[in-house]
Amino acid sequence: MAEQQNGDAPVLVLRDLVKHYQVPGGTVRSVDGVDLVIGRGEIVGLVGESGSGKSTIGKMAVALISPSSGSVELDGVDLAALPKRRVRAMRKRFNIVFQDPGSSINPRTTVGDAISEPLRIHRIVPRRRIDERVAELLEQVGLRPDTAARYPHELSGGQRQRVSLARALAAGPELLVADEPTSALDVSVQASVLNLVADLQQNLGFACLFISHDLSAIEYLADRIAVMYLGRIVEVADRRDLFERPMHPYTDVLLQAAPVADPVEQRGRERVVLRGEIPSPMNPPSGCSFHPRCPLATEVCRTTEPALRTVQRADGRTAQVACHLVGDDGVRAALPAESVPVG
Ligand SMILES: Nc1ncnc2c1ncn2[C@@H]1O[C@H](COP(=O)(O)OP(=O)(O)OP(=O)(O)O)[C@@H](O)[C@H]1O
Ligand SMILES: [Mg+2]
């Protein structure tokens, strides 16, 4: 009864994915029509301000919550069309790691039990080989095999996050969703956990949806990057293209807010001044939801919602953008005069 495993087919396809919550006073449009494809072994970074819907997408991608409409296809199988029992059986094929490792490991079980649980549930290895496999997994995430006997509270935050990774990868998933896996960690250990994710991905070849506020982490890890704003994806591009030639004005803003290592580069950047705060997803603006904050907005931006469409750049590479001001060649109309270079 094994699901079809098609070599070239994408691992994850999100189609017109919507998640709305009914709350007193209205509807929260957490995710509002998202299309995204993740290829086999590909790392896609998902960035956007707090509240833009990143975690909601991550949770739908691994069937922790179900969409209001639209579909999540894993290896070509629509999760919504499967009975619960089959979704559980598919769980070994995808997994999620959260910001707070405390939420994915039970404090009352040993590290060894936490890691071996998926091995037992999905019968990944014979019973007598479980301890051996746990030791291997611990080693893979840079922990000593004797960590198996310890309890989560005896570990540092970085070590706990390594345990979450070992547990998430125990069943050999094809897709790992990593939701801000380093942001609760001390800055000094963030880099080592990021390196670990990169190494594990290289060695094991899983696809990854890597969710983060941290653009430098995204730049380090991701092959492709999707930018979210108020429940929608506004730009998707290859990593270098996105950092070197962002198309959507919001992407510009995000890049400018991020610290830059090279002060010369900082001075050379054009500056888009961001007005106001992120609007409430209960009452999104008309037209392009970014228009009230966009220094380039025109009449059409106020009235008409831009679709996410594919553009082809001069070098032949394609990308996707939802902005009226970006041409089919991926080039945006010039910035107005009040946008001055920094410095
Ligand atoms: N269970 C829920 N009920 C009502 N609203 C919710 C629920 N879960 C999320 N939301 C709302 O949906 C929106 C998106 O939330 P989400 O957690 O996906 O954002 P995020 O991009 O992950 O933010 P952050 O960067 O802060 O983690 C927010 O406005 C949030 O308040
Ligand atoms: Mg989140």
Image (cartoon, rainbow, N blue to C red):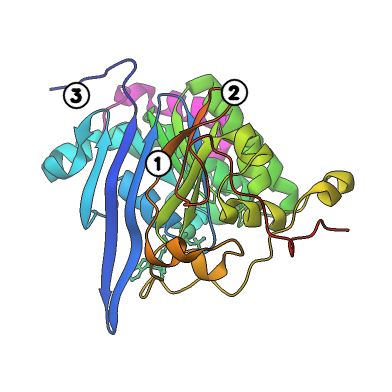
In the image shown, does 226 or 157 lie closer to the viewer?
226
In percent of width and height, residue 141 lies at 57, 32
Q: Quadrant of residue 131?
A: top left
SS class, disc 2: loop
Dot placed on the residue nearer the N-terminal end, 2 or 1: 1
**Disc nearest the viewer among 2 and 3:** 2
Viewer-nearest residue: 86 or 147: 86
Between 28 and 221, the residue placed more toward the observer is 28
Q: Residues within 10 Å of mark 1 (few under 14, many from 20)?
A: some
Q: Is residue 332 left or right of residue 97?
A: right
Residue identifier under label 1: 309
* Residue 222 magenta: no
Q: CA distance from mark 2 to mark 1?
A: 18 Å
Q: Quadrant of residue 194?
A: top right
Estimate the spatial distance between the alpha carbons at disc 2 and disc 3, rounded to whole Å: 38 Å
Relative to 60, does residue 207 appear above or below in the rendering? above
Q: Secondary structure at mark 3?
A: loop
The answer to which of marks 1 and 3 sits earlier in the sequence is: 3
Give the magenta range: 121-148
User: Image quarter for residue 222?
Assistant: top right
Residue 305: percent from left, percent from top:
37, 58
- How crowded pointer 3 is (Cα within 10 Å; few <14, some 14-19, many 20+) is rated as few
**Badge 1 residue CB within 8 Å of ligand 1:** no
**Percent x, y for residue 74?**
27, 33
Q: Earlier in the sequence, mark 2 or mark 3?
A: 3
The numbered dot on residue 337 is: none
Q: Is residue 139 magenta?
A: yes
Which quarter of the figure is the C terminus placed in? bottom right
Residue labelled with disc 2:
315
Mark 1 in CB contact with mark 3 (< 8 angstroms):
no
- Callout 1 amino acid: Arg
Q: Is 124 displayed left or right of 294 in the figure?
A: left
